Amino acid sequence: MSIPDLLSAGPPSFSFEFMPPRDEAGEAVLWESIRRLEQVRPSFVSVTYGAGGSTRDGTVRVTGRIQRETTLTTMAHLTCVGSSLASLRQVVGEYADAGIRNILALRGDPAGGLGTPWTAHPEGLDHADQLVGLIGSLGSFTVGVAAFPDKHPESHSLEDDADALVRKADAGASFAITQMVTDVDAYLRLRDLVAARGRDLPIVPGLMPVTYASQLERMTKLNGQPLAADVVRRIEQVAHDKEAVRRVGVAICTEHADRLLDEGAPGIHFITMNRSTATLEVYRNLASGRSAVPVGVVSG
């Protein structure tokens, strides 16, 4: 089944996002997490693409290995940053050779980091909708795109972001996954704006259980998204206690996931940071409180 089919199949979709590891120790942690999460039978998993395409080779390698060695449906990320058309075609070909048919198409952040001007490769692409079209022209791929409930850092308004999602859908995107959601109402506003434009595009909210206090600031720097004041307040109240931060972070993530599903979100995409324990705790919380959640088999 394609990812859009999985999203519309009935029970909520649960998926997990990983990063290519930096070294052998990181690789071991990643694979331990993958094997544990595989037991809950997620709808799919994804592997990110580093800033400026810095982890391109690792992304291709790890995504291919997951596809070959596990039972998981895999989705690879791909960005336009620093890549010519020839390079992008090559990566898509490498994914196809590995048996991967699901790709998340992203423009990517400016090579100089957030806040610096975006400059396309002179022989590359300038927008994500162009990348969606390119991937679609190269084979029978299912293409997803990014969504920004709190407004993309370069957008003038949330309405502009909704228009951008419509352009991506018109180019061939069949689903979207958001940046980390800390404000459920922001997700709902974006979803409703897209629906009002006549597009039935499944938008999967991304969630991450906060496990240490500085994680929120780090995520803000990475994706340029504002944080919900209530979330910041609750974490700051226990910032002196590591165990309490983790406990509150898991509780917030569970609350957000529960409400998002109640509001009709097609599923939840968990940002794992290559760690499985807190994510599985949120999943268990949902499984114990929602009869529609597939429980699976979880050990450890």
Image (cartoon, helix red, strand yellow):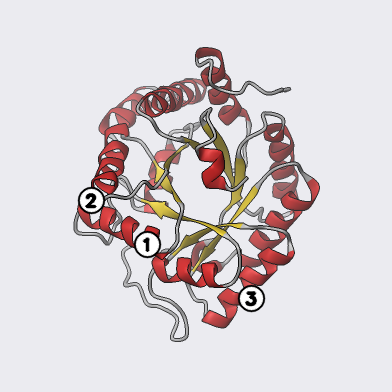
Q: Which mark is residue 82?
A: none
Viewer-nearest residue: 40 or 241: 40
- Say few, some or many: other residues with alpha carbon within 10 Å of mark 3 (under 14 / 14 to 19 / 20 or more): few
Identified at 52% across, 21% down, the residue is: 243
Q: Amino acid at mark 3?
A: Gln
Q: Nearer the viewer, residue 254 or 262?
A: 262
**In percent of the image, x 43 and y 76: which residue is there?**
125
The image position of residue 157, as x and y in percent, is 19, 54
Q: Quick one: SS at disc 2?
A: helix
In the rendered image, the quadrant that contains the C terminus is top right
Residue lying at the far right of the rendered structure:
69
Which residue shows up at 46% across the image and 23% down it? Answer: 254
> Of callouts 2 and 3, which one flags the residue occurring earlier in the amino acid sequence?
3
Q: Which residue is mark 3?
A: 90
Distance from label 1 to label 3 (Cα)? 24 Å
Residue 211 to residue 162: above or below: above
Toward which corner of the image does residue 283 lie, by quadrant? top right
From the viewer's perspective, tell me whether residue 11 is left or right of residue 63. left
The image shows residue 137 at horizontal and vertical percentages of 54, 72
Identity, as a three-letter code, of the amino acid under mark 2? Leu
6 w.r.t. 91: above or below:
above
Image x and y of residue 286, in percent:
52, 20
| Residue linked to disc 1 | 170
Q: Which residue is mark 2?
A: 158
Q: If you read the primary sequence from the N terminus, does the residue marked by circle 2 or circle 1 appear first?
A: 2
